Image (tube, helix red, strand yellow):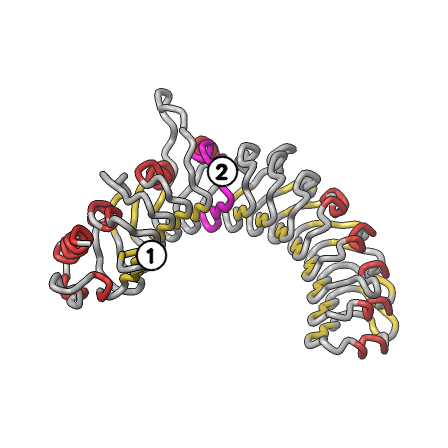
Amino acid sequence: MAGDIDLLISFKNSLPNPSLLSGWNPNQGPCSFRGVVCKEGLVSSLTLQGIALSPDFYLVSTYLLSLQTLEKRSLRSVNLTGNISVPPKCVEQLTELDLSSYNLHGSVFDAMSLSTSCPSLQSLNFSSNFIRVYPMEEDSPLIHPFPLKCLDLSNNKIEKNEDLQWALSGLGVLQMLDLSSNEITGSIPEFSNCTSLQHLDLSSNFLNDTVLAGTFSNCHSLTYLNLSSNQLTGTAPDRASCTHLTILSLSYNDFSGEVSTLSLTSMPDLKILEIGFNSFNGSLSRSMSKLTSLEILDLSSNGFSSSIPTSLCTKGVSNLKELYLQNNYFTGSIPDSLSNCAELVTLDISLNELNGSIPATLGTLSNLKDLIMWQNYLD
């Protein structure tokens, strides 16, 4: 415990403004310090969110990562600055490290290398910093495996997918990877080695190629996949190997062709399917009726035509809560079968070419709050 007090006080005294932690008194136990949480009298967690401490990363690396019994640490929004460096020593018990929303600079490899000094580290959050990927030099060693399970690098400055591919090659046990809101260009990086991956977010980048066959061929554990808000083209990527997906978002791209190429029947657990704002066309696949777990379906702003299939809502089976079909080219009448979606809260069929009368059966949907039907040819 004495060692922990010395480290905490040394950290405080090294700050630009130590008075921000004036309550950290060396004559008192660290369990009384602001932001310190103890378990059985030992420091187990440190949370200093929202305090403008403005420390350099070196101070965190030198003092805080050496706390003997620390398991979790969050320094979100404390104006941490400097370059990412591997600490000379890291407590073995540290499993979670949140260094998000700072002014930290460094490479993806620097960030992941923290796990080499922190052997128990499983969750690492470096979101909203200035992390980049530096090109691999010819004599660079192969990436050795990192034990991380959760890695959040969202909202950074990561650009080239080729260099990113090299940096991610050692993440075989990774379960969650968030690379959203970066500047990644080109095709989607290869994730076939990430066999344990469950959550992958590549949204809001500049990916602008077709999705190559085999990109997710070994991602059998994947349950969440977000590729929205990119510039991806071509037909919808085949997800036949992603049999456990529960959330799939492809919105705001330039995918084209028929939605049947998604192999929807291979994803029986799908709860959220978002493919709005693309260039999909043709009629809706009857296979959608087999997605009985589906709760949110967004097909808006595409080029779908023909009639709304009656099989979209199957009585006693459908769990749909939100259905977005607006801004397409659907024709014909509104099917009575929509009333079979008893859980429906939102239904938007505006900006289509529907005609005829509005089915009275829609009035039986007791949970319906938003019904949007304007810009059609309804009676």
- Residue under numbered circle 1: 74
State the residue at coordinates (45%, 36%): 160
Residue 283 in the figure: left or right of residue 168: right
Q: Dot 1: few (<14), some (14–19), or many (≥20) neighbours within 10 Å?
A: some
Q: 75 or 140, which lies in front? A: 75
Q: Is residue 290 magenta?
A: no
Give the tally of numbered discs.
Answer: 2
Q: 170 or 83, which lies in front? A: 170
SS under mark 2: loop
Q: Dot 2: few (<14), some (14–19), or many (≥20) neighbours within 10 Å?
A: some
Residue kind at label 1, given as amino acid type: Ser
User: Looking at this rendering, what residue extends furthest in the top direction?
Assistant: 139
Residue 85, x across and y down, in percent: 26, 40
Can you tell which quarter of the image residue 373 is in?
bottom right
Residue 300 seen by the camera: no
Residue 120 seen by the camera: yes
Q: Main secondary structure of the magenta part?
A: loop
SS under mark 1: strand
Can you tell which quarter of the image residue 54 is in?
bottom left
Which quadrant of the figure contains the N terminus? bottom left
**Magenta-colored span:** 167-182
Residue kind at label 2, given as amino acid type: Val
State the residue at coordinates (20%, 49%): 63
Can you tell which quarter of the image residue 45 is in?
bottom left
Which numbered disc, 1 or 2, marks the residue that appears first in the sequence? 1
- Residue under numbered circle 2: 173
Q: Are marks 1 and 2 in contact (CB under 8 Å)?
A: no
State the residue at coordinates (60%, 38%): 219
Residue 185 in the figure: left or right of residue 29: right
